[in-house]
Every structure is written in C-alpha cells, then in structure tokens.
C-alpha cells in the first residue's frame, strides 16, 4: 500500500501522461495531413496525366468515369498503405501510453476503497493520535446541538481532526 501512496505523491504523473498522448496525437495528425496533401497532389498529377494521355475527343463520360475509378482505386490503396505504416510506426508509442494508462487504472482501482464515501474520507484524519482520542472522548456523549457547534468550530479552525471526530460520532449516532 505504501507503494501506491508513493505513486500518488507525484501529482504531475497524470498531466505528463496526457502531455505524451497529446504529443503522439499531434505527430499522427501531422503525418496524416502530409499524406492527405501528397494524395491530393498525386491525384492532381494523375488527372493531368490522364488528360494529356487521352485524346481531346475521348473526353467522353465513359473515359472520365474510368479515370475517376482509377484515381479512387489509387487513393484507396495509398490510404490503406498509409494506415498500415502509421499503425506500425506508432505501435510502440501507443503501447507505452496504454501501459501507463493501465498502471494508473490499477492504482486508482486499488485506492478506490479509501475514498468509498465522504464519511470514510472525513473520518480518516488523526486516526490513532492523542488529539483524536481527546476529541472523541469529548464528542462521545454530545447531542445534536453540541455536535453542530463542534462541527462549525472545526470548519472555522480548519481542524480536520476535530471534524473527523464529529463525523465519526455522527456515524455512530446513525447506528444507534
């Protein structure tokens, strides 16, 4: 459990991971934009070549349709090749981001019971301390009015240990 707390001690871990994911996405988007640009330039060259190749009187709808189909097939093939290359070249980056996300997921899942409810969190400060024992002995026989006053005092003083003792007493009162 100490290992889990140590991992949480670095509050920059999640933002760093998010930054890495953003960088990876930016690189992938840039590559996609470059391929889109190259594909558009290639399509324009193919169209120009087709125009130059076909006699001017052969610009019938059938010829244009055939050239359009050839361009579409070429573009489809290039996109498929690009996707395979992109997946292959970014595999290690994606795997690393997913590994780190899985690690954070495991950590948060392990810590989930510590934050099960607001009462669990409120009653935790000062457990086992003499100050907490002192406060608990004071609130043990307190009624609603006195607990309200002590709760307000804990808020005003920002005294988490007193607040925890009051929260624990309220939890006991619910069981009674």
Image (cartoon, rainbow, N blue to C red):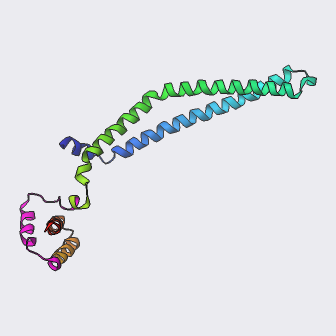
**Which residue is most to the right?**
57
Q: Is residue 45 visible?
A: no
Q: Is 49 drawn above or below residue 172 in the view shown?
A: above
Viewer-proximal residue among 127 and 31:
127
In the rendered structure, the answer to whether residue 89 lies left or right of residue 139 reads right
Residue 129 forms part of the magenta stretch: yes
| Range of residues picked out in magenta | 121-146
> Picture coordinates of residue 158 (x, y %)?
21, 68
In the rendered structure, the answer to whether residue 81 lies left or right of residue 58 reads left
**Which residue is most to the bottom?**
145
Residue at (8% x, 57% y) in the render? 128
Q: Is 164 drawn above or below residue 42 in the view shown?
A: below
Residue 133 forms part of the magenta stretch: yes
> Picture coordinates of residue 15 (x, y %)?
38, 46
Quadrant where the C terminus lies?
Answer: bottom left
Quadrant where the N terminus lies?
Answer: top left
Q: Can residue 32 be seen in this view?
A: yes
Q: How many labels does the image show?
A: 0
> Picture coordinates of residue 131 (x, y %)?
8, 64
Residue 79 occupies quadrant: top right
**Which residue is most to the front?**
176
Residue at (12% x, 58% y) in the render? 127
């Amino acid at each position: 459990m100490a290992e889990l707390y140590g991992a949480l001690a670095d509050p920059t871990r999640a933002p760093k991971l998010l930054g890495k994911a953003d960088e990876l996405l930016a690189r992938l988007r840039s590559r996609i934009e470059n391929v889109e640009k190259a594909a558009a330039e290639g399509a324009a060259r193919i169209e120009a070549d087709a125009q130059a190749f076909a006699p001017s009187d052969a610009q019938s709808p059938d010829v244009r349709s055939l050239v359009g189909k050839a361009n579409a097939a070429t573009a489809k093939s290039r996109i498929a090749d690009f996707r395979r290359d992109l997946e292959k070249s970014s595999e290690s980056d994606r795997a690393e981001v997913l590994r780190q996300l899985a690690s954070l997921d495991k950590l948060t899942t392990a810590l989930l019971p510590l934050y099960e409810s607001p009462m669990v969190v409120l009653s935790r400060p000062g457990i086992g301390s003499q100050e907490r024992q002192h406060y608990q002995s004071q609130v043990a026989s307190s009624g609603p009015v006195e607990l309200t006053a002590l709760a307000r005092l804990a808020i005003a003083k920002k005294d988490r240990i007193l607040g925890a003792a009051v929260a624990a007493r309220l939890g006991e009162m619910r069981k009674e």
